[in-house]
Amino acid sequence: MVFLADNILILGHGGFGFNTNVFETNIINLAAVVGIVVSFVGKNLSSLLEDRKNTIVNNLQEANQRAIEAEEKLNAARAQLEIAKKKAQEIREEGVLRATQEINNVVSQHELRLARLEEFKQETLQFYQQKAFKQAYTYIINKIMTRVRERLTKGLDSTYHVVVNNFYVSRFTQF
């Protein structure tokens, strides 16, 4: 008995026999099946694999294109966010500026009103002072006139007559 390539057993009488080694038989069977499949289905399988390869490549290209578009949209959104942040900061600064101006305006108006009130108060005080002085002058003049009438009705004595003359003389000298 002679072994050729460890798989086929050739008998001395010109016949074939079976190899009972399972591992070697499985490898031979697998090789035969793969060879038959490749020879009969090879072109169809290769065209299916080529179609699948093209589909996968197209899907990858589309995914890459979508990723690029998404990146562009993300960059555009970031740019808009930065613009919005700048605009918000400008609005915030403008609001602070307007609030400061409004506060200054209100303070100046308040100070102006306080000045007017102080002026009115001074005018009122001056008016009542003048009124009080006028009343005091009127009262004093009335008292003086009353005393003068009393003296005139009582009669003048010589000492009083000298005092009255001196008073008028001193008044004329002041002018």
Image (tube, helix red, strand yellow):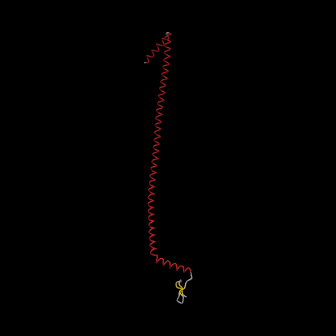
Task: Please identify the quarter of the rendering in which residue 48 is found.
Answer: bottom left
Q: Does 101 sit above or below residue 158?
A: below
Quadrant containing the N terminus is bottom right
Residue extending furthest toward the left: 175
Q: Position of residue 84 (x, y in %)?
A: 45, 51
Task: Please identify the quarter of the rendering in which residue 77 is found.
Answer: bottom left
Depth check, front residue: 168 or 76? 76
Q: Does 175 sit above or below residue 102?
A: above
Q: Does 7 sit above or below residue 67?
A: below
Depth check, front residue: 156 or 58? 58
Depth check, front residue: 121 or 24? 24
Quadrant containing the C terminus is top left
Q: Position of residue 98 (x, y in %)?
A: 45, 43
Q: Position of residue 162 (x, y in %)?
A: 48, 12
Depth check, front residue: 6 or 143? 6
Q: Position of residue 42 (x, y in %)?
A: 46, 76
